[in-house]
Amino acid sequence: MTTAYQFEELEHRVSAAIAAADPAVFDALALDVFRFQRAFNFPYDQYCRLLGVIDDLADWRQIPAVPQAAFKHAALRTFDAKAQVATFRTSGTTGEGYGQHHFRSMRLYEEAVLRGWDLLALPPLPQIILIPTPAAAPHSSLSYMMGALKARAFRGEQHWCIAPDGSLDLNRLKSLLENFATVNTPVLILGTALAFLHLFESIQLLTLPAGSLAFETGGYKGSGRSLSKEALYQMFRDRLALAPSDIINEYGMTELSSQCYSRGLGRPHVAPPWVRTVVTNPTTGLEVPDGETGLLRIYDLANLGSVLAIQTRDLAIRRGADFELLGRDPAALPRGCSRAADEMLTASS
């Protein structure tokens, strides 16, 4: 049985799991994906061997998670480089190098983005995007995700408001909002936390049409800026007249293919049914009791072509099967898919 055949067979099964959004299929499918990745991802197999991990695991929680930094040091893929169709990169500034996530197919990535979005049950709205376009940032997973979300915009309507030099195109943004307000059409405005901060520092008040929403991806990493989520959401209220319940936060990263979401303040991030999140004790590697703090580990079935299990450097509180994000481990280097989009804004400000 060839690598390509096995990849396509598992891709079909994972695709079906994403479409069904059925958590019951995760356990067995995760173990099958793990065995496939051990067989065809040589660096990951070597990593498992060093840990003394056997092939025939009994539980998906036993699947070894690679640290995020591994994506900077090894080509973690289950296919030949000639079959590669895309590569996403972390930002790679501040001297730590950049990580790379390689893809044989974009099918699962796009399906995970769109099905995860559908589970949010948001109304289809015209989209105003404060992130560089996929053409301007071809290695940005966040830009690619925004492009994929065109399929969920009202009549496919997207408006990108980043100028060629990477700065916010404030005049275009204001003109768009005035036009939508005139016809009383609510909008969805999407951007990184830093992009919104730049916007808020440039305006006093922009009135959004009733029913409008905001989508922010977090992240000030490497920018020299810092603002609590509560303070940022107060600025949403003061500058855009949006309540916290009108704001969706996305948790994602270059090394993943799926996203977790929370809405408003004081609510945990929820993973889609084809993803599992575990908050781990950094010393023992075991899951912490409910309500305790640890490092976030993520198992993403859509990561078929790379590595299913990733040990992040993010601190979180376990909230049952969900998690409350606290931020980066202070010992970790700054990085993140949001930062790659933010670098243009930082450089141009």
Image (cartoon, rainbow, N blue to C red):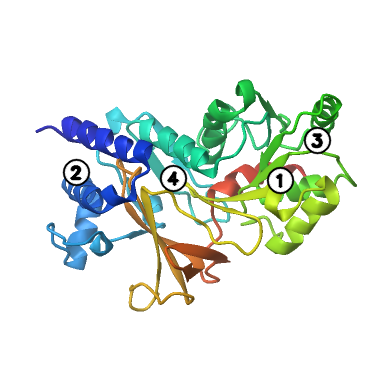
Mark 3, secondary structure of its residue: loop
For marks 4 and 1, the one nearer the N-term is 1
Q: Nearer the viewer, residue 314 or 247?
A: 247
Mark 4 vs mark 2, foreground winner is 4
Residue identifier under label 1: 195
Mark 1 crowd level (few <14, some 14–19, many ≥20, 10 Å Cα)? many
Q: Image point 75% across, 37% down: which residue?
A: 167
Q: Earlier in the sequence, mark 2 or mark 3?
A: 2
Task: State if disc 2 and disc 1 touch (CB < 8 Å).
Answer: no
Q: Please give the label number shown on residue 344.
A: none
Kind of residue sitting beneath label 3: Pro
Which sits earlier in the primary sequence, circle 1 or circle 2? 2
Between label 3 and label 1, give the one nearer the viewer: 3
Foreground mark, 4 or 1, reads 4
* Relative to 92, 31 lies left or right: left
| Residue 80 seen by the camera | no
The location of residue 97, given as percent across then percent down, is: 48, 52
For disc 3, the marked residue is 209
Residue 44 in picture, x, y percent from top left: 25, 53
